[in-house]
Image (cartoon, helix red, strand yellow):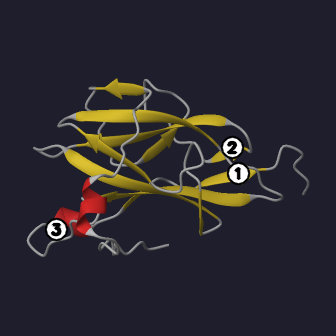
């Protein structure tokens, strides 16, 4: 699936300036600054290709640029937007230079095997022609969520 970033503001600018950022569970400076990654280990980036509904995992947002980088992050379950964490459909964070922030989250409940992916949009609502990074979107590897009582 290709993700095309189109994160232009639809609200008033003063509302955009007051976006509430969430606090990370862990901040790491280890050089593994992938923009968006789902892992089951806070000490290394270990891909989670299959997980069970209700499983607690981590997602990592990194910054390999030379200035702080703000992200808007969304979650997709079977290509439909769902909550990321704490009943929030969009979360915002700013990652300092050469660091990554980790957040705990729980895989959503499913009735059958389902795709799950996180997408990070850098410079939310600040897309400019002279800032290529503002036009990008970074996706985690897709994770398959299995129901607790998996049936074939």
**Residue appearing at x 26%, y 40% in the figure:** 95
Residue position for label 2 = 51
**Residue appearing at x 50%, y 72% in the figure:** 1
| Mark 2: secondary structure | strand
Residue 108 image point, x, y percent:
69, 49
Residue 146 image point, x, y percent:
77, 50
Q: Residues within 10 Å of mark 3 (few under 14, many from 20)?
A: few
| Closer-to-camera residue (36/87) | 87
Q: Is tag 1's residue or tag 3's residue first in the polypeptide sequence?
A: 3
Q: Residue 60 is drawn in which quadrant?
A: top left
* Mark carried by residue 145: 1
Q: What is the C-alpha distance between the residues marked 1 and 2? A: 5 Å
Residue 103 image point, x, y percent:
47, 35
Q: Residues within 10 Å of mark 1 (few under 14, many from 20)?
A: many
Quarter of the figure that contains the C terminus: bottom right
| Closer-to-camera residue (107/31) | 107
Residue position for label 3 = 132
| Mark 3: secondary structure | helix
| Closer-to-camera residue (140/124) | 124
Q: Is 36 above or below relative to 119? A: above
Q: Residue 119 is drawn in which quadrant?
A: bottom left
User: Mark 1 near mark 2, Cβ–Cβ under 8 Å?
Assistant: yes
**Residue appearing at x 17%, y 37% in the figure:** 97
């Amino acid at each position: 699936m290709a993700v095309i970033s189109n994160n232009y503001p639809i609200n008033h600018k003063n509302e955009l300036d007051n976006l509430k950022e969430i606090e990370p569970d862990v901040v790491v400076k280890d050089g593994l600054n992938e923009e968006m990654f789902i892992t089951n280990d806070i000490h290394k980036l270990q891909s989670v290709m299959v997980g069970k509904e209700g499983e607690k995992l981590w997602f990592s947002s990194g910054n390999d640029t030379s200035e702080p980088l703000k992200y808007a992050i969304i979650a997709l379950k079977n290509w439909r937007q769902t909550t990321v964490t704490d009943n929030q459909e969009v979360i915002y964070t700013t990652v300092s230079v050469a660091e990554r922030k980790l957040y705990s989250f729980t895989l959503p409940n499913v009735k059958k095997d389902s795709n799950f992916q996180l997408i990070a949009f850098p410079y939310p609502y600040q897309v400019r022609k002279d800032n290529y990074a503002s036009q990008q979107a970074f996706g985690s590897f897709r994770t398959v969520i299995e129901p607790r009582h998996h049936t074939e």
